[in-house]
Image (cartoon, helix red, strand yellow):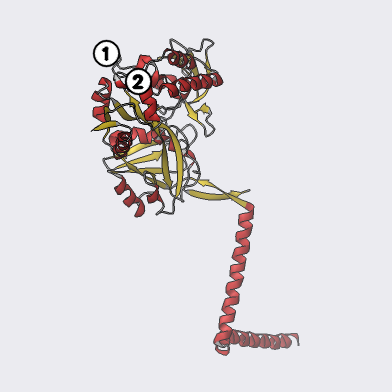
C-alpha cells in the first residue's frame, strides 16, 4: 500500500514539475512587451539598490587616502643648462626647509645648535645621512666656498665663521645636496624624466614619475598646455591661464625690478634730483642720462615707460640694452651706466648687506660687488653690519627698518616692481593647494606629498 501511494505521489510530483518548468519556459510568450519591460526595470532596480546600499556602506566605513602611482608632466620654458634653478627641489635637499609660516625646520638635519659666540652652526643629521658625504658634495660643487666645514662625527656637520652670521640659518634651506625626493633617469634637449627615490628620508613620494618638457618660449608652452601635453607649468600671462580649467597658485618672490642711480655720476650725486625723479617732479634743469638694461621684453617695455615719464621731467634718457651675460660680465662690473634697470634676488634671508654695504662697491679688489649704485653711507653700513651679527630676529628687523629709512631718504634707487610667480596646476594633482618659498624651484618644496591616485581604507 505504501509503495503504491509513493508511486502515485511521485507521478503527481513529476507532473507539477513539468507543468512549472513548461510555464517558466513559456512565460515570456504570455507576457506583453509592457509586462516584460516592467519586470526588467524591477530587476534592474533591485540590483541598483543593492549596489548603492553596498556603496554607501563602503563609503561610510572607509576613507580616502593618497596612493602611490601616476606620472606628472611639467612644462618649463628654458634650456637644460638652466635646470638647476627650476628643478633643484626635485633632485636635491637642504639641511633645513622653509615652512608656510616662514619658520625654518629640519630637512636633512633633524636639529641644530649655534655656539655661544654665534660663529659656529652645528647640525645633527638624520639617520642615513653622512656628514662626510655632505662635506664632499660641498667641496665638489664649490658651494659656500668661504665657509669652514668640519665633520666631527658621521652624524654632525659644522659650519664655522670668522664673525657671527645670522643669515646662515636661511642659507641652510637652499637645496644643495643631491638627496632629494627624485632622481633623473633620462635627459635630453627637450625632456627630462625623474623617478621617485625609495631612500628619500621622508619616504618614497606618492607620484612615481615626473616628466619635465622643455619649450623654447611662452607661446610653445601655452600651445602644449591647451593640447593637454602638460599638466603643471609656470605662466607669465594670466589671461592664457583663463583658457584652461586648471587652478592658479601665486607665490611672492624676494625679487625686485629696480632702477639704480650710479652715484659716481656727478649729476646723480644730487639727492634733490634723485628725489624729484622718485616723486615724479620736474628736475631743476635739463639732464641727459644713459639707461642700461637687459634685452628681455619686460625690461625693454619698462625702460621705454621710464624714458617717456622722465622726458616730461626734463630728463632725456638714452636706452642701451644688452644680454644678461654681457651685463653681468662686462657692463655691471665696470659700472658702465648712469642708470641701471635691473632685477635683484634677495634670496632666503632679508639681508641687504650684499647689495648696499659700501664694501660691495665694485673695485679691482672686488669686481663682483653688487652695490649697483656705488652707494656709501656710514650709518647704513653700521646697521647692516650689526644686523647680520644679531640672532634676535626682532632686533634684526628693527635695524633693517632703520636702514630702510636711510635708504628712502637718500634715494640711491627706486623700487619699481615686486616679482611673483604664477603656477598653473592640473585639477588631477592633489595635495597641492599652496606654494611658498624664495625661488621658482620652491614650488616643489612639498612635492613628496603631492598625489595623483587615491585608495580607500577602513576606518
Residue 96, image x, y percentages: 48, 26
Residue at image mark 1: 364
Which badge, 2 or 1, comes first in the chain's sequence?
A: 2
Residue 363 falls in which quadrant of the image? top left
Note whether 139 is above or below 17 in the view shown: above
Residue 208 in view in this figure: no
Viewer-proximal residue, 310 or 415?
Answer: 310
Furthest residue in direction front, as rendered? 284
At horizontal 25% and vertical 23% (from top left) the residue drawn is 336
Viewer-proximal residue, 243 or 155?
Answer: 243
Of tags 2 and 1, the one toward the viewer is 2
Report helix, strand or loop for mark 2: loop
Circle 1 packing at 10 Å, graded few (<14), some (14-19), many (20+), is: few
Report helix, strand or loop for mark 1: loop
Note whether 402 is above or below 230 in the view shown: above
Viewer-proximal residue, 379 or 253?
Answer: 379
Residue at image mark 2: 270
Residue 104, image x, y percentages: 52, 27
Note whether 365 is above or below 405 in the view shown: above
Residue 331 falls in which quadrant of the image? top left
The quarter in which the N terminus is drawn is bottom right
At horizontal 56% and vertical 83% (from top left) the residue drawn is 36
Residue 12 in view in this figure: yes
At horizontal 30% and vertical 15% (from top left) the residue drawn is 366
CA separation in Å, label 2 and label 1 = 26 Å
Residue 357, image x, y percentages: 39, 17
Amino acid at each position: 500500500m505504501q509503495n503504491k501511494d509513493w508511486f502515485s505521489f511521485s507521478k503527481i510530483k513529476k507532473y507539477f514539475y513539468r507543468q512549472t518548468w513548461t510555464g517558466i519556459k513559456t512565460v515570456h510568450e504570455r507576457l506583453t512587451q509592457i509586462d516584460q519591460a516592467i519586470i526588467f526595470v524591477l530587476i534592474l532596480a533591485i540590483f541598483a539598490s543593492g549596489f548603492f546600499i553596498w556603496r554607501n556602506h563602503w563609503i561610510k566605513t572607509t576613507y580616502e587616502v593618497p596612493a602611490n602611482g601616476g606620472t606628472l608632466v611639467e612644462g618649463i620654458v628654458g634650456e637644460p643648462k638652466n635646470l638647476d634653478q627650476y628643478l633643484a627641489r626635485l633632485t636635491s635637499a637642504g639641511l633645513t626647509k622653509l615652512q608656510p609660516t616662514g619658520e625654518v625646520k629640519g630637512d636633512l638635519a633633524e636639529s641644530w645648535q649655534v655656539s655661544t659666540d654665534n660663529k659656529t652652526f652645528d647640525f645633527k643629521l638624520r639617520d642615513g645621512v653622512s656628514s662626510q658625504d655632505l662635506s664632499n658634495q660641498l667641496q665638489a660643487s664649490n658651494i659656500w666656498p668661504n665657509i669652514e666645514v668640519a665633520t666631527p662625527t658621521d652624524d654632525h656637520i659644522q659650519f664655522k665663521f670668522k664673525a657671527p652670521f645670522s643669515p646662515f640659518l636661511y642659507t641652510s634651506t637652499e637645496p644643495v645636496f643631491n638627496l632629494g625626493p627624485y632622481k633623473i633617469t633620462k635627459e635630453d634637449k627637450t625632456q627630462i624624466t625623474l623617478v621617485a627615490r625609495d631612500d628619500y628620508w621622508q619616504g618614497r613620494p606618492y607620484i612615481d614619475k615626473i616628466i619635465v618638457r622643455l619649450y623654447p618660449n611662452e607661446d610653445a608652452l601655452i600651445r602644449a598646455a591647451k593640447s593637454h601635453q602638460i599638466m603643471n607649468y609656470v605662466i607669465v600671462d594670466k589671461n592664457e591661464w583663463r583658457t584652461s580649467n586648471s587652478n592658479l597658485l601665486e607665490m611672492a618672490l624676494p625679487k625686485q625690478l629696480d632702477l639704480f642711480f650710479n652715484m659716481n655720476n656727478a649729476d646723480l650725486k644730487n639727492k634733490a634730483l634723485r628725489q624729484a625723479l622718485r616723486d615724479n617732479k620736474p628736475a631743476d634743469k635739463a639732464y641727459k642720462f644713459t639707461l642700461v638694461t637687459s634685452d628681455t621684453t619686460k625690461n625693454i617695455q619698462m625702460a621705454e615707460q621710464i624714458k617717456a615719464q622722465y622726458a616730461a621731467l626734463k630728463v632725456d634718457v638714452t636706452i642701451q640694452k644688452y644680454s644678461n651675460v654681457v651685463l653681468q660680465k662686462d657692463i655691471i662690473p665696470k659700472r658702465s651706466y648712469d642708470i641701471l634697470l635691473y632685477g635683484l634676488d634677495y634670496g632666503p634671508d632679508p639681508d641687504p648687506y650684499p647689495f648696499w654695504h659700501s664694501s660691495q662697491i665694485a673695485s679691482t679688489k672686488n669686481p663682483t660687488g653688487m652695490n649697483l649704485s656705488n652707494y656709501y653711507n656710514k650709518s647704513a653700513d653700521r646697521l647692516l653690519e650689526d644686523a647680520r651679527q644679531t640672532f634676535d630676529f626682532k632686533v634684526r628687523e628693527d635695524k633693517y627698518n632703520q636702514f630702510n629709512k636711510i635708504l628712502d631718504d637718500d634715494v640711491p634707487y627706486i623700487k619699481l616692481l615686486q616679482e611673483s610667480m604664477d603656477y598653473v596646476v592640473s585639477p588631477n594633482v592633489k595635495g597641492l593647494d599652496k606654494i611658498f618659498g624664495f625661488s621658482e624651484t620652491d614650488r616643489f618644496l612639498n612635492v613628496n606629498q603631492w598625489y595623483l591616485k587615491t585608495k580607500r581604507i577602513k576606518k
